[in-house]
Image (tube, rainbow, N blue to C red):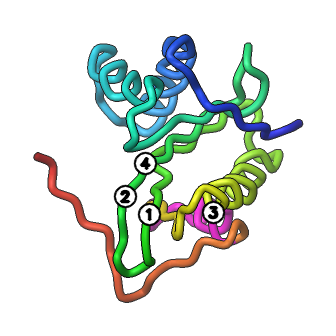
Amino acid sequence: MTAALRLARPEDLDRVTALVEAFHAETGLAQTDEERRAAVAPLLDGIPHGCVYLIGPARAPLGYVVITFGWSVEFGGMDAFVDEIYIRPAIRRRGIAGEVLTELPKALARGGIKALHLEVDGDDTSAQRLYQRAGFQGRDRYMLMSRKL
């Protein structure tokens, strides 16, 4: 099985939002279809703030990853955040997410990204191990904090 990545385009909106809906249902994130489409569509239209990659075959993707872009003085330039990564439950634990998290940073670095960040549930030791194997490290002195506006 391959974790080939393909940049999602506007014509992939239904395919991507179906995967996002499945991920959000699994993790308990409440969002209407309208909100979901409004959040995803600009990423597919090419706004400079992020992008969506479909994982695997174009007709039947295995999952997706959303990358958002920012700027970091600490890291010396443009940085990115893995906003969401999702692999269909039936094909998990086959190394697909690990492959994505190993190859995607290489491509992003070639594009000038200086650092790639992600957030993980503090109780999800399985996900933490996956991310550590892909080279991500916790930052003991820091904790991600959010404020919804």
Residue 68 position in % (x across, y down): 43, 48
CB-based contact (under 8 Å), mark 2 and mark 1: yes
Neighbor class of circle 3 (other Cα within 10 Å; few <14, some 14-19, many 20+) is: some
Q: Residue at x 33, y 15 (%)?
A: 33
Query: In whole angstroms, how far apart are the C-alphas of marks 3 and 2?
Result: 14 Å
Q: Are marks 2 and 4 in contact (CB under 8 Å)?
A: yes
Q: Mark 4: which amino acid?
A: Thr
The magenta-colored residue range is 121-132
Label 2 sits on residue: 70
Residue bearing the label numbered 3? 109
Which of discs 3 and 4 lies nearer the camera? The answer is 3
Hey, which quadrant is residue 40 in on the image? top left
Q: Residue at x 54, y 62 (%)?
A: 113
Q: Are marks 3 and 1 in contact (CB under 8 Å)?
A: no
3D distance between C-alphas at marks 3 and 1: 10 Å
Is 129 a magenta residue? yes
